[in-house]
Image (cartoon, grey):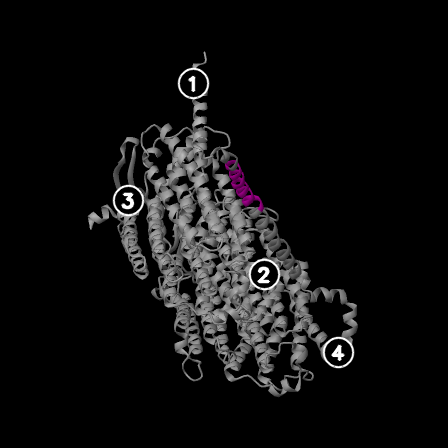
Amino acid sequence: MSVLNQHLLSVLIFLPVVGAVAIALSRRESETLQKILGLVFSTAGFALSLLLVRGFQDVAGMQFVERGRWIPAWGISYAVGVDGLSLWLVILTTFLTPLALLGSWSSIDRRVKEFVVFMLLLEAGMIGVFVALDLFLFYVFWEAMLIPMYFLIGIWGHERRIYAAVKFFLFTFAGSVLMLVAFLVLYRTAGVGSFDLAVLVAAPVDPALQVWLFLACALAFAIKVPMFPFHTWLPDAHVEAPTAGSVILAGVLLKMGGYGFLRIAIPLFPEAAVRFAPLIGVLAVIGIIYGALVALVQPDLKKLVAYSSVAHLGFVMLGIAAFTTTGLVGSVYQMLNHGISTGALFFLVGMLYDRRHTRLISEFGGLKAIIPWYTAVFLMISLSSIAMPGFNGFVGEFLILVGSWPFSPTLVVLASLGVILAAGYILWMVKRVFYGEPTNPKNEKLPDLSLREAAVLVPLVALAFFMGVASPLFTKRIEPAADALVVQVQERTRPIAAASLGPVAPPRASRADPAEAQR
Amino acid sequence: MLDDPLLKILPFAILLLPLGGFVVLALFGDWIKRDKEETGAAWLACATVIISFGLAAWTTVRLYGLVAGEGGLRFFQPYLGYEWMEAGGFSVPYSLLVDPLSCVMMLVVTGVGSLIHVYSVGYMAHDEDRVPYFSYLNLFTFFMLLLVLGGNLPLMFVGWEGVGLCSYLLIGFWYRKDSAAAAGLKAFIVNRIGDAGLILGMIFVFHAFGSLDLVDIADNAGSLAPEGLWEFGPATIAALLLFVGATGKSAQIPLHVWLPDAMEGPTPVSALIHAATMVTAGVYMVARLGPLYHVSETAMMTVAVVGAVTALMAATIALVQTDIKRVLAYSTVSQLGYMFLACGVGAFGVGIFHLYTHAFFKALLFLGSGSVIHAMSGEQDMQRMGGLRKRIPWTFWTFLAGTLAIAGIPFFAGFFSKDEILAAALGHPVLLGIGLFTALLTAFYMARLLFLTFFGDFRGGEEAEHHLHESPWVMLVPLILLAIGSAAGGFVKIPEIVQPVFRLGHGHIPHVAWLPVAATLSAIAGILGAYYLYLAMPELRAGLASTFRPALRVFAAKYYWDDVYNGFVRRVVVRGSDLVLWQGVDNRVVDGAVNRTATITGALAEMLRPLQTGFVRQYALLILAGAVALLGYLLWP
């Protein structure tokens, strides 16, 4: 058991690769076997990832760390580990992958083998990004993950899949090339001869250079989030991607943007991060309102959900920009919530698409009378998405707003408009799709949820509810790491601010959130 | 404070019973309703609420067994031992607050709630979706109880949002009707505007005062410096932000527009949610935070003025409605305005008093109108009614009790609470005047409703007359019990009971002898006016209508609120988002730039393409030329 624990993260990364190889070697015709193998490997990965939760200590600092030599000449090593910021994102990845495979059981009917292989490789890449502690390793996983996603959209997508796949690839690639340049410049200037994240964090860079390096990294991450105005690849990618692609894209891939800020951009370039925090906060709030307003007028269900992601992740970025412990915990929590609720919404839209081969809202109406269970699940996930208390979304948004108030009351007030608009775009869509008389004869004989579909959705609904009422079980694991990050950045930036470097934002009370709890 | 182990458990049991009812009905409802009459599910839902009522009464008794603290206040805070959220010094425990105010609210919610559950057994007997109906009703009761029992603002907010959700589900209960679906959506979104204010209010309270616990807020408010008119200190900002939430939930100007449309829901829902309980949540919150509001003169004045203006405006709209439920809906908006008026002039206990009497008579009036609608086979237009007094006598007599109570006829419940409100407003002549005039209007529109419905000749068709029938006992018993409450409920001294909660001393309101007389006279004047215009001399109506045509047109148009809001949402929000943001910014500007970059890159590549001819000899020639040029450059002196 202890051997397993020592290499748990590597096992989690490479188990899907082993699965992918095994499936790649199987005969093309045995599609069912490939699906089952994919499900078995990804489910085993999920089960193993729960060992992470069991063995995790609620303290700051990396755990389950593994270090190996890789390219010692350049100071590149294979170093992985998890802390409170990445723990749940790893679990989210291992949780959503088997569900995504199960959810596309019957909707993927060609090139099944390649599909399963790409899904598993994607999972490996995503876990790798979340646990990498070496910049070079991080970059390798970051790019490696792009390739399977590119093919998932480009091969199994819908009508305009090629345009969407290329757009997705170019947007992300443009950002990540700049990020690579930043990493290389940092490697040269830091002069520690290592790509190890912890080593680099301890070797401060000149604040003037930091600005450029931070901007390069921030652009890569902002595209991934996506933050306004770098978001236009997202609606196209989502609409054209197959359901599993959309689920993984929204559920996990977008989180890498926020995670990149927390793990890379802010710790490495704290002075620059503090300086640009107001800009990030403003763009985040623009994203909240803009994403919601554009979501309101989408005629296509999937595009609506895609734009809602822009709004939701605006909240995440607001919490990160605010940089208080409460706000950061809220942001990390909201990333999980978004993965669950938006992942589930994409599953639901995909199930509707499987039945009717359309996603246009105007094609539906009155579905409540025809498919009541589907409607009930859709409504519950909608409530999670619009942050109804009792579901997970509220906890995340509320912590973010509470934590962001000391940063900027104005931005919090503007962000609260997003709370209103979210109810508008989601429930207006619910009204048009589910309420009223079933007018379109094509919808009359739609079947309700199948057992397989229920098996995909029930865990998501249950988790959305559980995370809404028992959030400390999750957040207490996030908090020490978030708190340590806040302290670390404050210690680095305080003398700078004291020396009054022009428009550097003042250090903000973060741990000094007023008063202790009520109890 | 003495420790009472039972009090630690009882409030949770009160909450969990209706929640359990909901869970059982939602998951196993189809299985339970297998008996012939299919009322098993309905009675299960009733049982949970009735038992909850019993436990609430028991809790109240136990609470009074505690030793009173400062100012005669007895309270108890049961704590589950878990937190709801916790991060970076901010935490929300699962804790409740039991004090006289929450006991009154609990008893109203479960008491009136039980009666309405029972009434629904008859009213919804023929609806095929009655199992979901009762499950929603149970869920509503749970959230409403959480709202009044929650020990801190965020937990109260869970109830607050939860009742809003149930309201949404029940307004849109007949989901095939487009109007019902639209009304549900409107209710939710208008309420969300208020909720955003409430969320900001909570955040502000936390950062300004350091705690969201209701007892802490009330205790801390005592040490705050008073903030005068137009002085925007922390208490004022907090109170005003929170009041935005109250205007949403309690349908006050400018967020009142959702409540009349909410009448699309089944009538017992209108009685329970949109009259007796949920819509009073805003009043409860303001009263609960009374000590905080009291610090700020600006906030108090805002509450009082919004309440008074809403009371008057809604009463005038009620004058011209012809749908029986719409009259009652605007009446509810108006009466809620009275409650805020009371709170705004500092008489929080009186506001709760009116909330309590209103719960009886307005639930009674709604259920009575439901009985009328039931008798009329679904007809709601009063112009097709008339003379029903002899056909449905039980409904009539109970309805009469409700009418007299709301009109403020002496010794009926409404008389006492309204009189106290007016007495509390004595120091503010304008508010008092509005209050008295609205009392007259109230008596008028209620008498008009009564005369149009129950007196005169029947104006519906023969077919409808043939179907007229009194409601079954299961519906009449709740009516009778509520009529008793409406008649005698005013003798319970609610203001004295809840006063210690506000930490504002004894709160004794000086009375003057002429006020009850004036109030009674204005009520009688209203009733007499309606009598002459609708029974004795209906021919006068045409002349009056032409005299007051401009005013009546404004009343009938509901002061154009809906038109302005609809115009804004359709023309500005939806069209602006579509044309400017999506098609403009997203498609033209951002994607335009992206695609242009791609095109330019492509074009550049196209320009370089002729170089790649594929002719080896040409490449060799170029290499040679390059080598010569390089050599020349290097060898140049």
Q: State the CA–CA distance, disc 4 to disc 1.
A: 115 Å
Task: Name the kind of residue labelled 1 in the image.
Answer: Leu
Task: Name the kind of residue labelled 4 in the image.
Answer: Pro
Q: Residues within 10 Å of mark 3 (few under 14, many from 20)?
A: some
Using the image, name the chain to which the residue with label 2 belongs.
B
Residue B631, numbered label = 1
How far from the left and from the top, in percent, is residue B117?
48, 75
Give above or below for B21 relative to A26: below
Task: Name the kind of residue labelled 3 in the image.
Answer: Gln
Q: Residues within 10 Å of mark 4 (few under 14, many from 20)?
A: few
Q: Which residue is mark 4?
A: B538
How far from the left and from the top, in percent, is residue B523?
67, 72
Q: Nearer the viewer, mark 2 or mark 3?
A: 3
Residue A382 or A27: which is nearer the viewer?
Answer: A27
Q: Residues within 10 Å of mark 2 (few under 14, many from 20)?
A: many
Residues flagged by tags 4 and 2 on a common chain: yes
Q: State the CA–CA distance, disc 3 to disc 4.
A: 85 Å
Q: Nearer the viewer, mark 4 or mark 2?
A: 4
Quarter of the view holding residue A177: top left
Task: Name the kind of residue labelled 2 in the image.
Answer: Phe
